[in-house]
Image (cartoon, grey):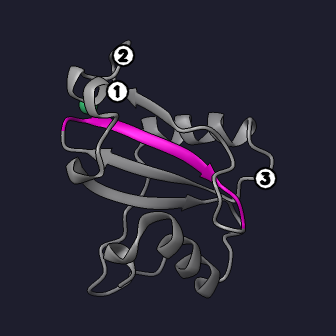
């Protein structure tokens, strides 16, 4: 693992990893999974194709809870409450350039640098 100086590298947590694997199993076109962490502790995830399009439906879940929180039920995990978002790439990960293009398309310009 090489470190990216000045750039925060977000990695999937163990429980997220399990969800990611489950999503990818049902999404053969997925080359990665978008992981969105919300300020309430819920997570939003969806597989992404190599074109940067959704390759699965959006999954929402909350650790150690049967359902997502009341807030998320209300606003469906609004982007204004997103604390962190990143894409977990399937190995072998696509080129840096493709990763950036897809990130931009999926997550928006706020994560482009
Ligand atoms: Zn929530």
Q: Is residue 55 above or below residue 25?
A: below
Q: Which mark is residue 80?
A: none
Classify mark 1 as within 8 Å of ligand 1 or not, answering yes or no.
yes
In the image, residue 94 sits, relative to residue 55, either above or below, namely below
> Residue 106: x percent and y percent?
50, 64
Q: Secondary structure at mark 1?
A: strand
Q: Earlier in the sequence, mark 1 or mark 2?
A: 1
Q: Residue at x 44, y 32 (%)?
A: 60
Tell me the number on the disc at residue 62.
1
In the image, which residues are magenta?
A: 40-50
Q: In the image, which disc is placed on residue 29?
A: 3
CA neighbours of label 1 inside 10 A, class few (<14), some (14 to 19), many (20+): some
Dot 1 and dot 2 residues touching (CB under 8 Å)? yes
Q: Secondary structure at mark 2?
A: loop
Graded by Cα atoms within 10 Å as few (under 14), some (14 to 19) or many (20 or more), the crowding at tag 3 reads: some
Taking the view exactly as shown, the residue that stands out farthest to the front is 74
Residue located 28% across and 30% down the image: 72
Q: CA distance from mark 3 to mark 1?
A: 25 Å
Name the spot of residue 45 as percent of width and height, x first: 49, 43
- Which residue has dot 2 on it? 67
Real-space Cα separation, disc 1 to disc 2, in angstroms: 6 Å
**Residue at the image position 54 percent from the left and 35 percent from the top:** 18
């Amino acid at each position: 693992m090489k470190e990216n100086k000045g750039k925060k590298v977000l990695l999937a947590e163990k429980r997220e990893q399990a969800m990611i694997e489950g999503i990818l199993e049902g999404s053969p076109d997925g080359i990665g999974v978008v992981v969105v962490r919300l300020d309430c502790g819920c997570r939003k995830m969806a597989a992404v194709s190599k074109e940067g399009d959704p390759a699965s439906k959006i999954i929402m879940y909350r650790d150690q809870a049967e359902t997502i929180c009341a807030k998320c039920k209300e606003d469906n995990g609004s982007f204004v409450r997103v604390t962190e978002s990143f894409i977990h790439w399937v190995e072998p990960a696509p080129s840096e350039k493709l990763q950036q293009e897809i990130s931009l398309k999926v997550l928006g310009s706020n994560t482009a640098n």
